Image (cartoon, rainbow, N blue to C red):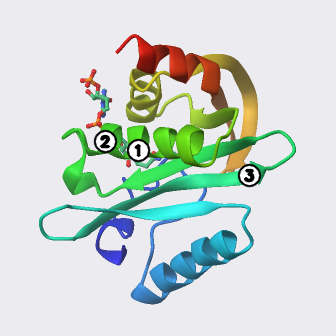
Amino acid sequence: MFLYSKNPECSKYCLWNPHKSRLDSWFFISMLKRGNRRLKAQHFAVVLKDSEKMIGTIGISGYSKRDSSAEIGYSLSPEYWGQGYGTEALKSIISYSFNTLKLNRIEAKSDTRNIASVKLLEKCGFKREGHMHKGMFMKGEYVDLYLYGLLAEDYNKAVEHG
Ligand SMILES: CC(C)(COP(=O)(O)OP(=O)(O)OC[C@H]1O[C@@H](n2cnc3c(N)ncnc32)[C@H](O)[C@@H]1OP(=O)(O)O)[C@@H](O)C(=O)NCCC(=O)NCCS
C-alpha cells in the first residue's frame, strides 16, 4: 500500500493524504480492518492474480442493515490506472453487494472533477442522482460531489439482458 499511497495523484480527490511512511499505511490498514470487524464496512485488497501484488483497495462502508444499503469506495495504484482493473474490481464488489450481501442499494460519491471515478461508476451502471454543491470539506476547501446510486432491481435487469 505504501508504494502507491505515497503518490499524491492517488489521493488527490480522496479524504486521506499521501502516506509519508509505512507507518501511515499500517495505520490506514488498521482503520480499514477495524471497520471490517465492526461490520459497518467490508474492505478488500485488490491484488494481481498472477503475482498477488497488492495494487489497491475497494470496499463498502456505511453499511445499513435497516436500509439494506452501503457506500462504495476505491483507490488503485496510479501505475495500474487505465488498464481495466478498476472496472474488474468494481464489478466484483457490485456482484458481491447484491448477490452475496443481498443489498438493495449501493451508492458512491465522487468529486465532480474526478473524471476517472465518474467514468468508472457510469461504465458499471451507476446512475447520477444528484449534484451536491460544496458537499464535502476536503483538504482546506468545500468541493462539489456527484451522488451516484445503483439499485438491485436495475442491476438484476442489466444482468438478465447481458
Ligand atoms: C478511479 C479509478 C479506481 C479508476 O481505475 P482504473 O483502473 O483506471 O479504471 P478502468 O481502467 O477500469 O477505467 C474505467 C473507465 O474509466 C475511463 N477512465 C479511466 N481513467 C480516466 C481518465 N483519467 N480520464 C478519462 N477516462 C478515464 C476508462 O477509459 C474506462 O472507460 P472505457 O472502458 O469506456 O474506456 C482510479 O483512477 C483511481 O484509483 N483513482 C484514485 C482514487 C480515487 O480517486 N478514488 C475515488 C475517490 S476516493
Contact, mark 3 vs mark 2 (Cβ under 8 Å): no
- Determine if residue 139 is in view: no
Q: Is mark 3 within 8 Å of ligand 1?
A: no
Q: CA distance from mark 1 to mark 3?
A: 17 Å
Residue that numbered label 1 is attached to: 92
> Outermost residue toward the left?
50
Residue 112's quadrant in the figure?
Answer: top right
- Measured as percent of width and height from the top left, residue 31 is found at 62, 76
Contact, mark 1 vs mark 2 (Cβ under 8 Å): yes
- Determine if residue 133 is in view: yes
- Measured as percent of width and height from the top left, residue 44 is found at 46, 63
Residue that numbered label 2 is attached to: 88
- Going from N to C along the chain, the mark reached first, 3 or 2, is 3
Residue 57's quadrant in the figure?
Answer: bottom left
> Type of residue at label 1?
Ser
Q: Secondary structure at mark 3?
A: strand
Q: Quick one: label 3, few (<14), some, or many (20+) residues within 10 Å?
A: some
User: Which residue is more in the foreground, 159 or 92?
Assistant: 159
106 to the left or right of 7: right
Q: Is mark 2 within 8 Å of ligand 1?
A: yes
Q: Secondary structure at mark 1?
A: helix
Where is 49 relative to 25, above or below?
Answer: above
Quadrant of the image containing the N terminus: bottom left
The residue that appears at 67% across and 77% down in the rendered structure is 34
The residue that appears at 62% across and 48% down in the rendered structure is 101
The residue that appears at 18% across and 41% down in the rendered structure is 83
- Measured as percent of width and height from the top left, residue 147 is found at 66, 27
Residue that numbered label 3 is attached to: 63
> Type of residue at label 3?
Tyr
